[in-house]
Structures are given as C-alpha cells and as structure tokens.
Amino acid sequence: MVSKRFIAKRLLLLGPVLFGVATVVFAILHLSPGDPAIAIAGERASQEFVEQVRSDLGLTDPLWEQYVRFLGNTATLDFGESYQIRRGAAVGDILADRLPITIELAVLGQIAGLLFGLPLGILSAVKKDTLTDHFSRVGALTGISVPIYWSGPLLILLFAQVLGILPTSGRIGSTYFIDSKTGFILIDTLLAGNLAAFQSAALHLVMPVIVLGVYSMAFISRMMRSSMLEVVRQDYMRTARAKGQGAKTTVMKHGLRNAFIPVITIIGIQFGSMLGGSVLTETVFEINGIGTLLVEAINKSDYPVVQATVLVFAFMYTIVNLFVDITYSVLDPRIDQ
Amino acid sequence: MPSTDSAVPVSRSRVERIRRLVVAAARWVAIGAALGAAISLALLIVWTPRAATDTAFALGALVLGFGVIAWSTAVGLGHTIEGMKAHLDVSAGWTEASAREAFFVVSWTGAGWVVAAAACSILLGV
C-alpha cells in the first residue's frame, strides 16, 4: 500500500510549486508590454481617466506591494475581479463556469487515447514485425506528427462540410437550453432527462475528442509497445510459459502489469498536454473552456484571469502527477520503499 | 543505553545539517540582494525610480519563481528522472541531489534579489 509519508511529501510539494508558478506568472505579466488600464479605458481615453482606472485597479502601488497583495489573496483563494472578460465578476466564478468544460474534454480525450492506445500497443508488441505492427507504428507516428491546428480544421472539413454528419463547433445544438448543474454537458443533459440534447452534446464532442485522443493514443501505443517488448523478454515470462501457461494468459497476467508502469508516466504527462492542447482544440472548435479563456485574457491584459487560469492549470497538472505516483506505488510496491 | 547513544549523533548531525543549510541560504540571499540592488541602481540610469525598481523586482521574481518550481520538481521527480535516465542509458552525470543543490542556490538568490529591489523601492520613496 502507498505510505502516508509518501502522499504527505507529495502534497507538501504542491505549496512550493504553486508559489513558484504564481511568482513566475506575476513577473511575466508585469514584464510584458500592455497596460490593462488603457485596455479598459480605451485607446482614446484621456490621460486623467487612464490614471484613475490604474489607481482603482491598484496598479499605481509599487510592484512589491502588488505582489504581496496578490500572494495574500491567492493564499485565501481570492483571485480578485476580472478587468475585462466579465468586468467586475469574481474570477473564481468565471473559472467555475469554464473549468468543467475543459476537464470534460481532457478526460474524454484521455479515455479515447487509452481505449485505443493500450490494445494497439499490446497488439503491436505481441505481433512484432508483422503487418499489424507496421500499420500500428505508422498510425502512431502520424498521430504524434499531426498538429491539432491542422487535424482539427481537416476533420471539420470532412465530417461537417463534406459528409455533414457532425456539427462544426460549439457544445450543443442551438435549439437546446440546458440548466448547467455540474458544468459537464453530458451529465447535465442526462440529469435534465433530455436524450435528444444528450445526443446533440455527444455529437458535438466527437471531433474535439478525436483530435485530443489521437495524439494521446499515439504516445500511449508507442510506449506500451516498447515497454511490452522489454517485459516479454524477461525470465519470469519465459518461466510462466515453461510451466505451461498460455501465451495470452502470460501476457495479460504477468506482462501487462509490469509493462504498464512506464506507460503510467506517459498518461500523467499526456494529461498535462491535454490541458495545454485544449487551448488549441477549444479555439478550433469554438468551445468556451479554460483554454479559450486564457487566450482571451492574455489578449485583453486581464491580469487576474491569466494568473488564476495558469494557477489552475498548474494545480491540475500537479494533482494528476500525484495520482500517477500513487498508482506507481500500487502497481510496484518497491517504488514506495 | 544503546538507543540513547545512537540517538545523540543522529540529532547532532541533523542540527549540523540545518545549520549548514541556513548558512548557505544566507550567503546566497546576500549575493542575490547585492545583485538586486545593483540592477535597481543600474536601471536608474535609463529609467525613472519607479520603473527601475519595478523591473528589477519583476526580474528577481522570475528568478525566484523559476528556482522554486525547478527545486520542487527536482525533489518530487528527481529520483524518477534519475531512474528513467538510467533505464534509457542516457545518464550524463545528472543527479537529483545536484539539481536540488543548484536550484536551492537559484531560489535563495532570487529571494535576496526581490527583497533588495523592494528595499530600493522603499529607500527611493517610490
């Protein structure tokens, strides 16, 4: 079992990581060009008005004072109010609206990647140097090489424009009005008992999930293949076969668990890429998740939203990696020693 | 009393280790403070006191933030990275301990830097 000390150490590291990320984001925002006061007041506003806005936002204080205030507020999970995106609204509320959208997309993309990547990798390793292996490797290489901003529009062109079987963009058809209870569109439509809306939401998710899933699948299948190839050469695998165990049982019972350990790392790293990739995917498919929020906030010099969004990304990435570490220890208790 | 005898050196070595860490941290904070003050004053030549101290502070915060993130990563994932490098047979002398030490230096230098830049800002009456 995973020791409490191990988990406590990882949780304690969360503090320095978030402090570091908050500090770097704060520094970069203040070193980069762009004045939020001008962005709010407008290019044609008088100097007095711009100064008034700057004073209202607390930007006239020395930077170290702003930094101390920012750290203090962040420690109490008070991210302040949005300058531009939804002027005056609490950043926490904006994030709460947008975050489930990105999580839903990333989780479904990861599930799709695992569902196809794992069997493909195992099959490729078991049938090494056959036609199946070659096809699988070419497929994986293609998946890794194709960028999201190219595959996304290509899928839209094929499935929405040419074949007309999938919607182009958005999260749900414009004729459906669903109360957002959880923020996850699939769950909300089911809770509303509206199956037609559920179907519409599911169809809207197909292309973004494919785009994210293919990338993940490609990495997972390649890692699974190489890991499995190494495991099948081990003595304990030969011993299991020599004792009369079938090839399939040996692979599934002894091989899979050991081959899965390096793949877990890739899954953790991939989830981080999914969050990063969501910026592009959401932009291409016009989904209002946290990725598009970040782009919009950077363009509008909305400091509180940028800072909070990056912190949320860092928090999620760290938590996912904590789970990865815990899974490691469960699969291979020696790691915990 | 074997248990008491063995506990004393352990406790002493821990105290000694903490003392060495504090001394090292203080040294790097001092170096960082000198850097922060020097950069704040150097920027005064071209910018207003406000812009000079703010820029020096932001640069110091960048160093501090980067150091802390990298140090945490070295502590949290150092052994995993070491294991993976050994597994892939691409080890080039990188160790968790050396990375931890290097980013300890960067972090404390950054901390001294931001403190000095803030102090300059106060002294210049910004």
Image (cartoon, rainbow, N blue to C red):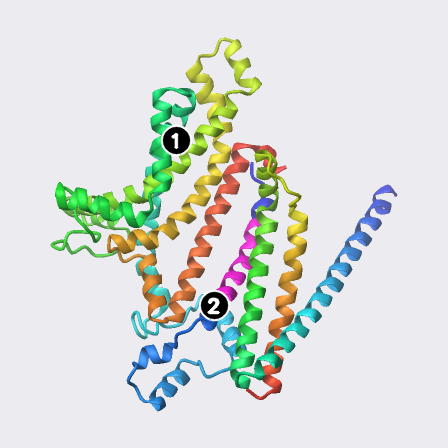
Is residue A182 something that shows in the picture?
no
**Label 2 marks which chain's residue?**
A
The prevailing secondary structure element of the residues shown in magenta is helix
Q: Position of residue A32 (x, y in %)?
A: 44, 71
> Label 1: which residue?
A118
- The disc, 2 or 1, on the residue closer to the chain's N-terminal end is 2
Q: Is residue B44 above or below residue A326?
A: below
Q: Secondary structure at mark 1?
A: helix
- Magenta-colored span: A10-26
- Residue drawn at (68%, 54%) of the image: B101
Q: Amino acid at mark 2?
A: Ile
- Residue drawn at (65%, 72%) of the image: B35
Question: Magenta segment: does it hold A13?
Answer: yes
Instruction: Specify the quadrant that holds the C terminus of chain A.
Output: top right
Q: Is residue A254 above or below residue A246?
A: below
Q: Position of residue A330 (x, y in %)?
A: 52, 35
Dot 1, how many residues are within 10 Å of its Cα: few (below 14), some (14-19), or many (20+)?
A: many
> How many numbered circles does the render carry?
2
Residue pushed farthest bottom? Answer: A48
> Label 2: which residue?
A28
Q: Amino acid at mark 1?
A: Leu
The answer to whether marks 2 and 1 mark residues whose Cβ atoms lie closer than 8 Å is no
> On residue A110, which mark appears?
none
Q: Position of residue A39 (x, y in %)?
A: 33, 77
Instruction: Specify the quadrant that holds the N terminus of chain A.
Output: top right
**Label 1 marks which chain's residue?**
A
Q: Are discs 2 and 1 both within one chain?
A: yes
From the image, state whether disc 2 or disc 1 is nearer to you: 2
Question: Magenta segment: does it hold A12?
Answer: yes
Residue pushed farthest front? Answer: B46
